[in-house]
Image (cartoon, rainbow, N blue to C red):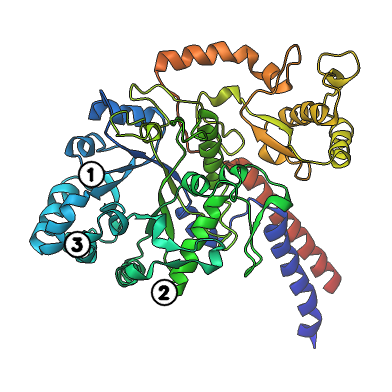
Amino acid sequence: MANTKKLPPFFLFLLFCCCFFSTSSPNFVPEIKVQQDKDEPYVGVNIGTDVSNLLSPADLVAFLQLQKITHVRLYDADPDILKALAKTKIRVIISVPNNQILAIGSSNTTAATWIGRNVAAYYPETLITAIAVGDEILTTVPSSAPLLMPAIESLYSALVAANLHNQIKISTPNAASIILDPFPPSQAFFNQSMSSVLSKLLQFCSRTQSPLMMNLYPYYVFMQNKGVVPIDNSLFKPLTPSKEMVDPNTLLHYTNVLDAMIDSVYFSMKNLNTTDVVVLVTESGWPSKGDSKEPYATIDNADTYNSNLIKHIIDRSGTPLHPELTSSVYIYELFNEDLRSPPLSEANWGLFHGNSTPVYLLHVSGSGTFLANDTTNQTYCIAMDGVDKRTMQTALDWACGPGRANCSEIQPGESCYQPNDVKNHASYAFDSYYQKEGGSPSSCDFKGVAMITTTDPSHGSCIFPGSKKVSNKTSEVANATQASGANTIRFLGAQTSKFDKNVHVLFGVTLCLFYYSLIQVQLS
């Protein structure tokens, strides 16, 4: 009988401790989080070499280190670049060019030689993480398709022989066009003419825990479906609920095209009875310049797409189908490849010009820092188009009231009073609140009526708060950029002080012991 009296308080004690550590402390990390952190998604870059006066391998690697770029993908296995990457922390995907698939797929000896020459000779000093066998073979070189899987299997056998198969994965990048009927995602399926190869590829990826590599470009989806796919959905811009894409079969809501493309891959894999292979986006991006037939290939759109893409990955947003799983992405590409053939956009996908100066400044403040000289924080929060005046007025009233935005400049007679309309006044108030909150993306929402832009909304004598905030820094940043010749790219997540965590744990233990002592006094 004595045990029955002690049991409830003891369980209350355990419940109290468990609740404290599990709900009160977002920084208390259970053991299962270790595996999640190990697989934390990242943003990498592709390095094409059709560039006039390309940096030497040594200068290229120094540039990558300056930019804090941690993951790159090469379209070959350039020995000089691989040597230069030795003893750095940069992880690299190397590639088997399309014109070598035939030889490797036809000979195990050739495959073993390739691994010895291009992998074993450099690993582990050079951190080779994966081998991309060909590039879009099934759609661009269909004649080589029958030898794709033999090539992959032969290369894998050579990795096994070198005892490197657990460190280095093998897959092949595929074009999005291998999927038919991609939207809604739940109806997507692989092109049946390729299903025999894809079935074997997925079985291989499942068996070796390798990813399915996909090249996914919302730019092309938008260009091929203008009038159907809105530009805002393609650029990851904030949407009102009415503008979200809805899968009628699953009722999943899609706020951007890339997520829909990734989920279409997962549904297609499921149709081939594969559910344990992750998607690795080996290419995605937006061109910054195009010819007359490509009016949406602009610097602003390229900046918006890549900046929002980076935020999406760093924030670990996942997809509607798999919110728990965020695909890593390689941006296409590091440099503008000015030697590429027309159309004009082919030469203008880069974040940097060939001389390593930036094509544009990415704006990702709010999800950790990506560019070191993105200290200007040149992003603004403005009112969206097409919102009714009553809803906009409600948001404006909140910003100037409870939000404590500085709305003095939109009063009668002040510099931002004209034009005297709700949308203009709301944009100023929204930006004031957004800048006050440090440019956090979550502070530019206002129930779906606001959006972040990289275009300065200042006009005439009306200078928006974001412009005021950066004006004193602009010249310093410009000089720093000119001196270094480049922006610095960082891949940093938010970090929590170990001291704060330790104090929280100590506080929790103290409370638990205090509560337990009260129980003992009561029972005695």
Question: Vertical placement of 45 versus 67: above or below?
Answer: below
Query: Percent from the top left, x then y, of residue 466?
Result: 69, 23
Q: Nearer the viewer, residue 139 or 162?
A: 139
Q: What residue does disc 3 label?
A: 151
Distance (Cα) linking label 2 and label 1: 31 Å
The residue labelled by disc 1 is: 76
Question: Do we see residue 31 in this rendering?
Answer: no
Q: Residue at the location (46% across, 46% down)? A: 220
Q: Residue at coordinates 45% horizontally, 55% vertically from top-left?
A: 39
Q: Are marks 3 and 1 in contact (CB under 8 Å)?
A: no
- Identify the image quadrant of the C terminus: bottom right
Name of the residue lying farthest toward the left: 109
- Are the two marked residues, 2 and 1, in contact with CB atoms closer than 8 angstroms? no
Left or right side of 165 for 493: right
Q: Amino acid at mark 2?
A: Leu
Separation (CA) of disc 3 from disc 2: 22 Å
- Give the residue number, with chain letter if any, for mark 2: 272
Q: Position of residue 397 (x, y in %)?
A: 89, 34
Q: Nearer the viewer, residue 38 or 440?
A: 440
Q: Secondary structure at mark 3?
A: helix
Horizontally, is 477 left or right of 273 in the view? right
Q: Quadrant of the N terminus?
A: bottom right
Name the residue at the front extreme. Answer: 292
The quadrant holding residue 106 is bottom left
Q: Amino acid at mark 3?
A: Ala
